[in-house]
Image (spheres, helix red, strand yellow):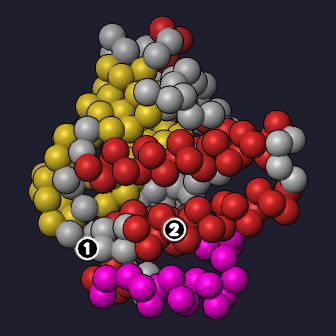
Amino acid sequence: MKKILWNSVALLVLGCLCGCQEGGYNLQGKVTGPQFNGKTVYLCEVSGSALDSVVVKDSRFGFNLPDTAVTVYNLLLKDKQMDILPLSIPVVAGDGVARVTMGDVLAVQGTPLNDALYEILVGIDELFGEAMSGKIGAEEARAKLRQYLKDKVVENKANILSVYLLKSYRSRFTAEEYEQLVQQLDKRMASCLK
């Protein structure tokens, strides 16, 4: 399991996208680091609105929701009550049991969509790492990220990850690029962007 730098994940927008597929939802989480026991994990929408919260106990937490549409949420783990930059990771709900790790390592897996989301996050993190290390310049990094995101949107055109990426990274695309990508989506996914 690769480590995701939490500050690049924090660049992702918060949470929930419109649900366009049916399914159930169970999330099992663990935290690394005893300092998080007794802290709160929030299940949030894109708007940042908290839908639910649980307290970490014995380095574990979980959310169970009744059947819901396949949706991307954001999990926030706060170390302090007024934490300005809490640990944050997106997670897909509604396609089985998702397993999340938060703390020193941020990871999400356990379902095909969460496995794909994690691979995308690792890819984004690697691009940020290249740019931060000086291996590539800022302009090249922006171009590589834009192309990577385009490829992942098209690759996931029939599932909610395409919608998540387009909403989260809309500022990375020109208006023309954005419209071209929306036109390539499955009709149900495209309707989530209206």
- Residue 15, compared with residue 59, is above or below; it is below
State the image coordinates of residue 75 (x, y, percent, origin top left): 44, 42
State which tag comes first along the sequence, 1 or 2.
Answer: 1
For label 2, the residue is 151
**Local crowd size for mark 2, using a 10 Å CA cut-off: few (<14), some (14–19), many (≥20):** some
Secondary structure type for disc 2: helix
On residue 7, the disc is none
- Residue 59, compared with residue 94, is above or below; it is above
On residue 20, the disc is 1
State the image coordinates of residue 123 (x, y, percent, origin top left): 56, 47
- Quadrant for residue 84, please give it: top right
Whether residue 84 can be seen here? yes
Q: How far apart are labels 1 and 2 at the CA level?
A: 21 Å
What is the span of residues highlighted in magenta in the rendered image? 170-187
Q: Is residue 28 left or right of residue 156?
A: left
Q: Nearer the viewer, mark 1 or mark 2?
A: 2
Give the quarter of the figure containing the N terminus.
top left
Q: Is residue 170 left or right of residue 144?
A: left
In the rendered image, residue 45 lying in the magenta stretch gets the answer no
- Residue 57, compared with residue 74, is above or below; it is above
Look at 33% across and 79% down and name the residue there. 189
Q: Nearer the viewer, residue 167 or 85?
A: 167
State the image coordinates of residue 18 (x, y, percent, origin top left): 35, 71
Secondary structure type for disc 1: loop
Look at 21% across and 65% down and name the residue there. 69
Whether residue 51 can be seen here? no
